[in-house]
Image (tube, rainbow, N blue to C red):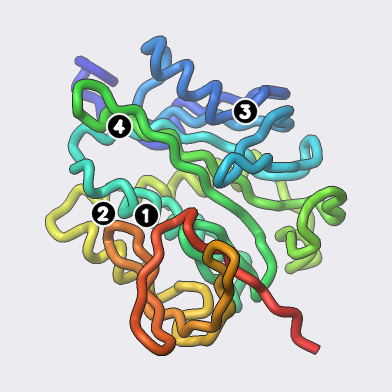
Amino acid sequence: MAGSGVKTVIGIPFIHLSEINSTNIYAMEQVQAKLAEHGTVFFADLQTAGKGQMGKKWESEAGKNLLISVVLNTSSLNMGDQFALSAAVALATHDFLSVYIRQDLTIKWPNDLYWGDRKAGGILIENQISGGIWTHAIAGIGININQTQFPGTTSRAVSLRQITGKQYNAVELAKELCFYIEKRFHQLLISDGSIKIINDYNRVLYKKGEMVKLKTGNSSARYTIQQVDRLGLLYVSGGIPMQFSHGTVEWIIETKQ
């Protein structure tokens, strides 16, 4: 711990909360109050105001899923590594899920976990910047584990139980996931680590090399997914090469007949 010479490990301490508004909100409050440091993980059985990307709610049935927020000290990273960190957390989640899901598992830009065309999990990274220094990131991760019905949410949601036919202990899985986050976070800290992270990310990119329908503003068109760069821009081709930043484009997933 700080001042003790002992290196912190992601997942220690592991704090299990029965109910909270949002693990990300709670984790950020704890960091700002200097009550949580690098490696602290907050797990919740139930979130009453779970947060997803772009201000969306993350819906989850009580006690059925993996809902955690991980405190990461980012002071040794560059401000330009924000997407690389997001990619590292997505890859760690992909590494972890790959133990249980042997095929068709990808990362949908920027950081959703997809099995085929169905969403198995999502990630929300929130940053704390102080005095021009990126001090901490809170990595919120939600993975559908034992839930089998998703009322009020996209029908494209899918859980580990639905994929494998087995039930799991979500707390034990969360602790297992911490091991993979630890590995990918330390990969970021080494020389050229962010380049390797982005290369690994592109290897498992959802729909890479395939034509998809994307909507920008009021118009939509088909593009071929090429790659994502270290700043998080999505490169596509179709007529002329283009790139999109997160939040400026919407995927139109077409149902196969």
Please say if 39 is above or below 233: above
Q: Residue at x 56, y 46 (%)?
A: 53
Q: Position of residue 176 (x, y in %)?
A: 53, 47
Numbered circle sitting on residue 73:
4
| Image quarter of residue 204 | bottom left
Q: Which mark is residue 88?
A: 1
The x, y position of residue 162, in whole percent, is 79, 64
Residue type at numbered disc 4: Asn
Total labels: the figure holds 4
The vertical placement of 192 against 59, above or below, is below
Q: Earlier in the sequence, mark 1 or mark 3?
A: 3
- In the rendered view, would you say 188 is above or below 207? above
Residue 244's image quarter? bottom left
Mark 2, secondary structure of its residue: helix
Q: Foreground: 108 or 90?
A: 108
Q: Which residue is mark 3?
A: 22
Which quadrant does the C terminus fall into?
bottom right
